[in-house]
Image (spheres, helix red, strand yellow):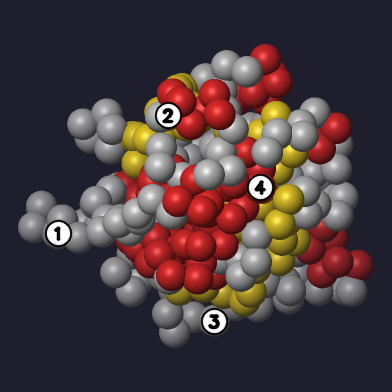
Amino acid sequence: MLTGCQDRRATQNWWRIAGVVAVAGALALSGCSSKNDTSAGPSTSTTAAKAQKVDEIAAGVPDDIKKSGKLVVGVNIPYAPNEFKDASGKIVGFDVDLMNAIASTLGLTADYREADFAKIIPSIQQGTFNVGMSSFTDTKERQDSVDFVDYFSAGILWAQRPGSPIDPSNACGKKVAVQATTAEETNELPKKSKACTDAGKPAIEILKFDGQDAATNAVVLGQADAMSADSPVTAYAIKQSNGRLEAAGEISEAAPYGWPVAKGSPLAASLQKALQHLIDTGDYKTIASNWGVEAGMVTKPVINGATS
């Protein structure tokens, strides 16, 4: 299986879309909303959890981080709904709300530093960043360089119009919208289409779009029967559609998102305990639900949980 969320190219990226744009604006394109219809615009304001410092958990934070009062977080954007900028330029998203709550639990303030994705793990190794937050897929290969605290499960998820059901495992003869150069376009759909033709059935008509917004909009407008994308992207598109989209089938090819930290750092255990605390209090679910990504929630965070 290909892995490497946020590597931005389909040859390595199963879970993060190359050149992704905020899908929240998708339904405002191509005549899908009128001047009086503002409901399709991006939702970047949430009621974030108000986490409080937990002394027992905060006590385990490495001394240098504890003394600074900051958790320095390397981030690469955009990737709605996990991390992107709102109209004012503020970094927002599911990951951001969750990391803010984690930092508060540890008695710290999250300090976000933008960086090229490829530079985040090296910067963690060099001590420039304490942790990475860019929808990284935890992989065995990456564990040679850093440790991961797994906080979410992501995969591939399809969406359809209500009342027009489609089976992702048997979409022969259907039109499926996808962003060009993603793994869904280069791997998932060609494999499924070949299975159709091998069985003597019509091929899947793969509709390729330069941006995820256009792919999403094609389904809403009836130009495509369904769309396939990374599960957080699809879930957020569904949440923003005000009932014009719904999930088709279940999440497939799931793998864990993780926060990378320096190899052997006690910070990993601190992050794990803080996340378990937020799961136990319900704050984790609140944050995930605010962004429509609760399908990927985990119940017990682990360190280095990748199986491949």
Q: Amino acid at mark 1?
A: Asp
Q: Residues within 10 Å of mark 4 (few under 14, many from 20)?
A: some
Q: x, y percentage for residue 30? A: 30, 49
- Helix, strand or loop status at disc 4: helix
Residue under pointer 2: 70
First-in-chain label (3 vs 1): 1
Closer to the eye: label 4 or 1:
4
First-in-chain label (4 vs 1): 1
Closer to the eye: label 3 or 4:
4
Q: Residues within 10 Å of mark 2 (few under 14, many from 20)?
A: some
Q: x, y percentage for residue 233? A: 50, 53
Contact (CB < 8 A) between labels 4 and 2? no
Q: x, y percentage for residue 272? A: 62, 52
Residue under pointer 3: 165
Contact (CB < 8 A) between labels 3 and 1? no
Q: Amino acid at mark 4?
A: Ala
Cα–Cα gap, marks 4 and 2? 17 Å
Q: Residue furthest left?
A: 36
